[in-house]
Amino acid sequence: MTQFTDKSSRGWRLIVCMGFVIFTGLSEQACVSADKAVHVPAKLDKDPIIPDKSAIGAGETSAIEERWGVKLQGIQLSAAGHMLDFRFWVTDTTKAAPLLDKRNKATAIIEDTGAKLEVPNVPRIGSLRQTSKQVKQGMRFTILFANPGKMVAAGQKLTVHIGDFSVEHIIVGDILNAPPKLQKINKRPVKND
């Protein structure tokens, strides 16, 4: 075997060797895959399920609960009319998860004017919106929307968007669903006999 002293010829020799290794590896892979049966996934008869993103009317409480796993309590004026208090409670933790994800921005739209109301982000406090990663059935949540200049009054209709969640025609001041009663916890000490 002759020894090359030229550095450029060593580089070419290395490239040729690597090419040969790659080629034999690919051809071996082709032989192996030719021997195996090729699995072709069956075509689905139905179209893939695409989540429904259309708005639901506030009066359709069963449809809201079915799709989003929450029961809306409604929107009330708060803080002397400068805030809107949107409340709901969870009935299905899996379906309600997108509503409680802080990455999904919450907005309320005044249906008469189209004006958008945002959730204030206060220094040292943060967003005036409850979120949770550990949601339990029956948990209640509140989102406060700013109402600058008291643009919204009792009786006006709003549409609330949280990510893909969209409920329209929520009348400010109306109670849609009364919240469930909290269970009292007996705090008497337990005696061990």
Image (cartoon, grey):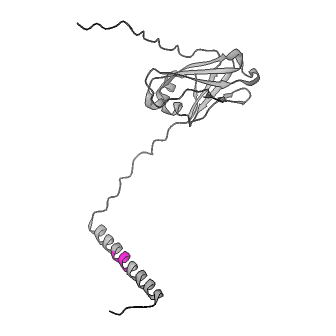
Residue 176 seen in the current view: yes
Q: Residue 116: image x %, image y %?
A: 70, 31
Instruction: Tell me which secondary structure the magenta stretch mostly adopts.
Output: helix
In which quadrant of the rendered image does the C terminus lie?
top left
- Residue nearest the viewer, comparing 118 with 3: 3
**Residue that extends furthest to the right in the rendered view of this protein:** 149
Q: Looking at the rendering, which quadrant does residue 9 occupy?
A: bottom left
Q: Which residues are magenta?
A: 20-24
Q: Residue at x 33, y 71 (%)?
A: 30
Quarter-wise, where is residue 111 in the image? Answer: top right
- Above or below, comparing residue 113 to residue 50 in the picture: above
Going by the image, does 34 lie left or right of 89? Answer: left
Q: Is residue 178 above or below residue 160?
A: above
| Magenta run includes residue 134 | no
Q: Does 23 lie within the magenta span? A: yes
Q: Nearer the viewer, residue 74 or 26?
A: 26
58 w.r.t. 102: above or below: above
**Place of residue 29 in the rendered image (x, y in percent of width and height, measured from the top left):** 32, 70
Q: Residue at x 45, y 83 (%)?
A: 11
Residue 154 in sight: no
Outermost bottom residue: 2
- Front residue of 69 and 148: 148
Left or right: 43 as drawn, with respect to 83: left
Measuring from the top left, give residue 147's x and y in whole percent: 71, 23
Circle count? 0
Task: Name, please, the residue furthest toward the front.
Answer: 5
Question: What residue is shown at x 62% (from left), y 22% (from top)?
Answer: 170
58 vs 136, left or right, is right
Residue 22 image point, x, y percent: 37, 75
Residue 25: quarter of image: bottom left
Question: Which quadrant would the N terminus be assigned to in this image?
Answer: bottom left
